[in-house]
Image (cartoon, rainbow, N blue to C red):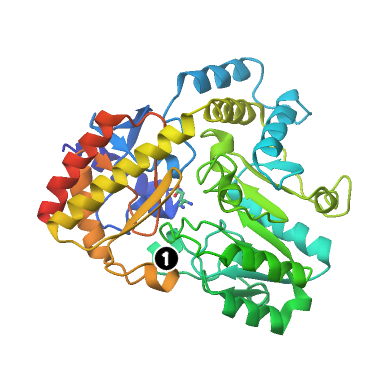
Amino acid sequence: MDRTQSEKLWEQANKTLVGGVNSPVRAFKGVGGNPFFVQSGAGAHITDADGNKIIDYVLSWGPLVLGHAHPEVVEAVTKALEKGASFGIPTEAEILLAEKICALVPSIEKVRLVNSGTEATMSAIRLARGFTGRDLVVKIEGCYHGHVDCLLVKAGSGLTTLGTPTSPGIPESHAASTLTVPYNDLDAMAEIFKAHGDNIACLIIEPLPGNMGVILPEPGYLEGLRSLTGQHQSLLIFDEVMSGFRASLGGAQAKFGVKPDLTTLGKVIGGGLPVGAYGGRADIMQHLSPEGPVYQAGTLAGNPLATAAGISTLDILARPGVIDAMEGQMTKLGAGLGSIAQEAGIPVYQTQVGTMGCMFFNENPVRNYEDATTSDTDRYAKYFWSMLENGVYFAPSQYEAGFMSSAHDDAIIDQTLDAARKAFAKL
Ligand code: HOZ
């Protein structure tokens, strides 16, 4: 695989961009070596700076449920751009996107659009604190909620990949307001609530974690969190930035039948453009300015290009059979990879919910962050590079999810499995 142009761009990038990138996990530190540069995307493929055509299972880290540059999404965004890129004045498209979100996500009665998942979680935490008049936040070890100060404690995704799950630069007082508990451990959670329940504003969790690899909630776990938070009048926040519209059309909350008080969203609702959202019970949301005193604002919030992309993406995704077909392809891919691994005698532990999934290089089940970190990351790195060499891009870290799009047809899955046979033969 020719990488001449990518290597040149990498050298150039490092002169002006910190570490050559604008988001750390892109630097490929989790697998070693240098990243490739992308030139364009179409459907299930991206084309790199050297003209290599690569099958993409990262899909911009999740948003591109319809694949790259879906013609209807491109048309919607183009039409919106022709009418003006930003107004900072209400537009009808904001209402339409809000209505779609409220209709699809079971617990959302009212919603606020923002510009990223980080903004959504940061604002949801502020709202929870403002609503309850309490300060403490409980988070789960290995869950990642963007780069919000009080949530960068024992966080997954890029932090775990880089081996620094808690970031310097966060005042002691911020970190002290965050309590952490392992995923899938209801007893530990009950202890925390017993000790601090009266001061806990909220428990924030990825109900289907995707930032320490994809880990499944054990039966009764999410229900247990719902009942504990309810008993202590603390709010339950589901971070569905990743699982929203992927675990199912209504997210993990619809899939597992547990309703949080607040939900944070991002990725899919922007169809590839920068968007986030938080929403939930109307009586909580009405504490937000201008209805209530909790302040949060944004010049580009509800941006017309982003809302156009989001509306079009959700419209297509909600068509009969679309998400089911994608889920079927994910299952086919997982089953294929599983049997190839087994034939090669390489132990793997696989997870899948809806259109997201993960293959841990681990001989044991992975049920929390500690388990995830026992995975063989060196073997993952070899697998990653071998797959890329054979034209398939999975995330450059064992601790990220794999994503399916509606553009991944049977031929693409078969091609992926051919590449995997070659990769596993070398492991
Ligand atoms: N938050 C993303 C991983 N879960 C990383 C996004 C990026 O680096 O582009």
Q: Dot 1, crowdedness within 10 Å: few (<14), some or many (≥20)?
A: many
**Quadrant in which the C terminus appears:** bottom left
Q: Is residue 37 above or below residue 385?
A: above
Q: Is residue 142 above or below residue 423?
A: below
Q: In the picture provided, is 66 more to the left or to the right than 6?
A: right
Most extreme residue toward the left, as rendered?
Answer: 425
Residue matched to label 1: 160
Foreground of the two, 232 or 264: 232
Foreground of the two, 423 or 35: 423
Expressed as whole percent of the image width and height from the top left, the position of residue 120 reads 66, 50
**Residue drawn at (74%, 42%) of the image:** 111
Is the shortest distance between ligand 1 and the CB of mark 1 under 8 Å? no
Expressed as whole percent of the image width and height from the top left, the position of residue 115 reads 63, 42
Q: In the picture provided, is 374 more to the left or to the right than 109?
A: left
Name the image quarter holding residue 36: top left
Expressed as whole percent of the image width and height from the top left, the position of residue 340 reads 18, 50
Expressed as whole percent of the image width and height from the top left, the position of residue 408 reads 34, 32
Foreground of the two, 408 or 127: 408
**Residue drawn at (28%, 66%) of the image:** 362
